[in-house]
Image (cartoon, grey):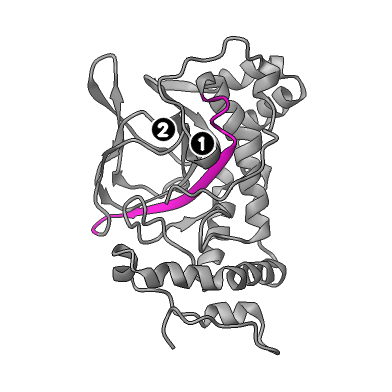
Amino acid sequence: MTFSTVIQHDIGTDALTQARNLTLPSREAMLHRDVSVQTFWDNNRQLLKDAWLEWDKNETTGLQLPDEYLLDSNLRHAVQQAWTNPEKETLVKDLLHEASPGVFQFQLFDPKRLTELRRYFDKVADAKIPLKPPYGIALNRYGAMLDARSEGYLAAPSFQAFYQTLLDQYMRPIARLLFPEIMGFDSQGFGFSIQYEAGVDTSLRMHTDASAATLNVNLNLPGETFTGSQVDFYDPNTRNMNRLSFEPGMAMIHKGSLAHAAQPIQSGQRSNLVLWLFGEGGYIPHNMKADESISAHDRWQVPNVKQDHYAPF
C-alpha cells in the first residue's frame, strides 16, 4: 500500500485504527510538494477528522482538556470585563508592553499551568494520527496545523473549541485595540504550532507574514531553557533590528507586515503556538489608516462572516 492509498471506513474497523495504519508521505515528498502529498491529505480528510473525534471521546480520560483557565488570570479577568463593558478595554491595554515599535509583549498563558497544555500536546503526538507539519514556513519537523482550513489539522473537538476561543475572545479584540487599521481584515483565522530544536532547525530568515496580525506565544515550561532562537524585529524609527526573547507563556503580537526573523537555536528546544488573522480570501491591509469612527464596542465583537477555506500554506 502506498501513502496515497485511501483507507475506507471498513465495517468493524474504527476510524482511529484506520488512521493509525496510514503511512505518512515522506519528508522529501513534502519538501518537494509532490502531488501525492496533497492527494494523501485530500483522500483522508474525513477519516482523520473522525479519528480525532474518536480519540477525544475515548483516549483523553484523566487528561486536563484545554480551557480558558490555562490563561494568565490578570489577562483573563481584564478580557472578561472588556467583553461585558468594552469601555473597560484599557484594563487589557495596561497589560500589554511595547517591547519594540509595533511589537507588544504580554503574559498569555499562566506558566504554572503550561504543564497541562504541554501534556495535552504530548498525548496528541502519542495518538499516532497523521498531522501535517507547517512546512510552509520552514519545513518545521515537529509542529502541526491547527485550523480546520488546513489539511491534516488537529481536529480534536476539545482543542478546536479552545483554539476558537483564543482567536475570537482574545487575539482579535487585542489586535484591534493595538492596530485598529486591521478592522475588516481580521474575520478569518489560521494557526500552527512549531518547535525549534538545536542541531536540527536553523534560523528563519527575514520575512513578513501573510496576515493582518500575528500572535506568537511560547509554550516552554518554566525551567525548560533554551539559548538562541531570539526574534529580531525591524525598527522603522532607527532602521535597526531589535532582538526580543521569549519567556514561558509570553506572547508577542504585531502586524504581519512588520519584518522579523528568528535566530538559530543553540541549545534546548523552543515550542510556540502561532495564530494569524486576515480577511476573506487572505486579504490583508496595505498602508491603511484606522477608521477613527470605530468605537470600543465595535472592537469587542465577533465578525458575523462565514469562515472561508483559504489557507496561506
- Residue ID at (53%, 73%): 43
Precedes in sequence: disc 1 or disc 2? 2
The 10 Å Cα crowd at callout 1, few under 14, some 14 to 19, many 20 or more, is many
Give the vertical position of 33 relative to 161 (above or below).
Answer: below
Tell whether 274 sits left or right of 240: right
Q: Position of residue 168 (x, y in %)?
A: 64, 37
Does 93 sit left or right of 169 as displayed? Answer: left
Q: Is residue 230 above or below residue 16?
A: above
Is 139 within the magenta? no
Nearer to us: label 1 or label 2: 1
Q: Residue at x 29, y 21 (%)?
A: 235
Q: Residue at x 69, y 65 (%)?
A: 62
Q: Do we see residue 97 in this rendering?
A: yes
Residue 129 visible: no
Q: Quadrant of the N terminus?
A: bottom left
Instruction: Report if residue 188 lies within the magenta region.
Output: yes
Q: Position of residue 135 (x, y in %)?
A: 36, 57
Disc 2, SS = loop
Residue indicated by mark 1: 278
Residue indicated by mark 2:
256
Kind of residue indicated by mark 1: Phe
Q: Residue furthest right?
A: 84
Tell me the magenta residue range. Answer: 182-199
Disc 1, disc 2: CB below 8 Å? yes
- Disc 2 marks a residue whose amino acid type is Gly
Circle 1: element type: strand
Of residues 243 and 110, the one nearer the viewer is 243
Task: Residue 40 in the image: state x and y as whole percent.
Answer: 46, 72
Question: Hey, which residue is sitting farthest top in the picture?
Answer: 292
Residue 205 x, y percent position in the rendering: 24, 42
